[in-house]
Image (spheres, helix red, strand yellow):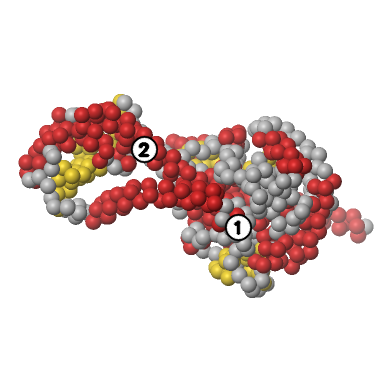
Amino acid sequence: LPFPRQKVLKMRALHSIAESSNQLACSLVMGSIDLSASGAAASQRRRYSLVHQASFEKSHIMTLKRANTQKRREELESHLDKNKQVARDLNDEGVDLIFSLEDDGQIFFSVIVASSADLTDFLASVIHILDQNKVSMQHMETRPSIKRRGIDLLIECSVDHKDCAVAALAALKKAHPSISDVRMYKTSQDTEEVPWFPRHVSDIDKCSHCITKYEPTVDPRHPGFGDIAYIERREELNRLAAGFKYGDQLTDVQYTEAEHDTWRQVFEKLEHLHESLACSTYRRNLAMLLKEGVLTRDRIPQLKTINSFLEKRTGFILRPCSGLLSARDFLASLAFRVFQTTQYLRHHAKPHHSPEPDLIHELLGHVPMFADPALAQMSQDIGLMSLGASDEQIERLATVYWFIVEFGLCREGGQLRAIGAGLLSAYGELQHACSEVPEHREFIPAETAMQKYEDDDYQPLYYVADGIEEALGKLREYAAKFIRPLSLIYDPYTRSVTEVRTVNDLADSMQRFKLDLSAITTAIKLLPQLEKRENSDKENFQSLYNS
């Protein structure tokens, strides 16, 4: 029977991805090592970004997986002893599948066997061998082989012990030298592996991985390279941030007069530009923060002062961290309305540019946006969409986030205005982005996700949305299309997420929804009475006034 075209294409894709991903992982990591060692192209890098972190993290994980697969293959060879060639020839996914299984417990998988043997005798022998080794068949198909003379046999089967699967493969190879290829793949019955993610706000203690660092101790590109006092101060603040855990009280940082002066220089120069180049939402929220005394022009605010205001307004809080986080950890924190921020400042020699996120970038770039309820909600939605996402999805989501939340533009009154925190906290690039020098394209998340970012100079390309709400709305819609094996619901009362796989998992959420709906319904019913009472009070007041 011929394979359905969709299944044939899927098998080809699986084969292609399995082989090419290994080569890609090695080349990516070798490339990063070469750049770092030579110091040539890398020496021109002007900043590290969330996208850089996501790409590095993905290639790093792929390399670890490849090394782990090789180790498992060697263990399988040792286990088979007299038929080591089975382990050597088995595809990577097949090796990982075998070792991901428990010793006992039913598992489902598909096997593709390529052979030049006579079809009738070969099928009878295969069925017999599988039955002998307690492998149950659910489905079998054959087709003429595409790559070689002979046939391809697809078998969908299950076993109750992983050793049965290994024994069946060894028996097939031993009985049929005509078999040229054997491959194993997961089937849809298997539960898809989901990367770890925090389920309660306290789990963010585990989301503090700084994969790469731009350190003044070892990197001559850093403006603070060789400045012992700056290096020691930075290390002091990083130790303070690294020791912070959920439930701890934030410790006030005693910033120096030099640090306050750096803050003042940046604030005064940016404030002038913000009047003409920042979006209206940012200007409105920044004015509110200044009026409430949360931010001041000449003194660096404490995180707990900002948290006291933000938490009452949008539920967001800032949490100290010691550097640029991995993309997965950064986005996961947003899911719980937590923004992880550095506490050190850029070097005073270059106050108007920082090649890495610092406190000025976090407070002047991001905080005014988190003070807006709609933007806070959308930021949390993006974070929720990242939980359980694949490495590839994280990389794409981080790329889109970079181009719009960090370096995005919008149009207001026919003029370009900045909405990205990276622009709003960088004097030079803010002017560049809103000028006619770079290219400006409409923000379409699916296209933006594939765009290469520039880390050696100002961006040659910026994405433009009709408005900030539209931009973040598009980003949320894009993330919502990610295919994940689970859904999540956030519980604002316990600050935790509930995994939804069955209808029963919705019980608590539905109960909260019913209570909220009941309260809203009651309020709506009372409105006419309240309005009538208000009108009566006005009439009584007018009567007293006239008398």
Amino acid type, residue under disc 1 in the picture? Gln
Looking at the image, residue 437 lies above or below residue 228 = below
Which residue sits at x=91%, y=60%?
A: 546
Q: Nearer the viewer, residue 258 or 341?
A: 258
Q: Nearer the viewer, residue 253 or 157?
A: 253
Which residue sits at x=27%, y=55%?
A: 9
SS assignment at label 1 = helix
Q: Earlier in the sequence, mark 2 or mark 1?
A: 1
Looking at the image, residue 182 lies above or below residue 163 = below
Mark sitting on residue 352: none
Q: Which residue is mark 2?
A: 69
> Residue 254: percent from the left, percent from the top?
81, 39
Tell me which corner region of the image, top left, top right, bottom left or bottom right, holds residue 463: bottom right
From this viewpoint, which residue is outermost toward the front?
A: 38
> Residue 211: percent from the left, percent from the top?
56, 43
Q: Nearer the viewer, residue 78 or 9?
A: 78
Badge 1, how many Cα within 10 Å: few under 14, some, many 20+? few
From this viewpoint, which residue is outermost toward the right?
A: 547
Amino acid type, residue under disc 2 in the picture? Thr
Q: Are marks 2 and 1 in contact (CB under 8 Å)?
A: no
Which residue sits at x=38%, y=49%?
A: 23
Tell me which corner region of the image, top left, top right, bottom left or bottom right, holds residue 417: bottom right
Looking at the image, residue 314 lies above or below residue 454 = above
SS assignment at label 2 = helix
Mark sitting on residue 44: 1
Q: Is residue 483 left or right of residue 202?
A: left
Gap in Å between the C-alphas at discs 2 and 1?
A: 36 Å
> Residue 228: percent from the left, percent from the top?
75, 42
Q: Is residue 496 left or right of residue 222?
A: left
Q: Nearer the viewer, residue 497 or 1?
A: 1
Is label 2 or label 1 in front? 1
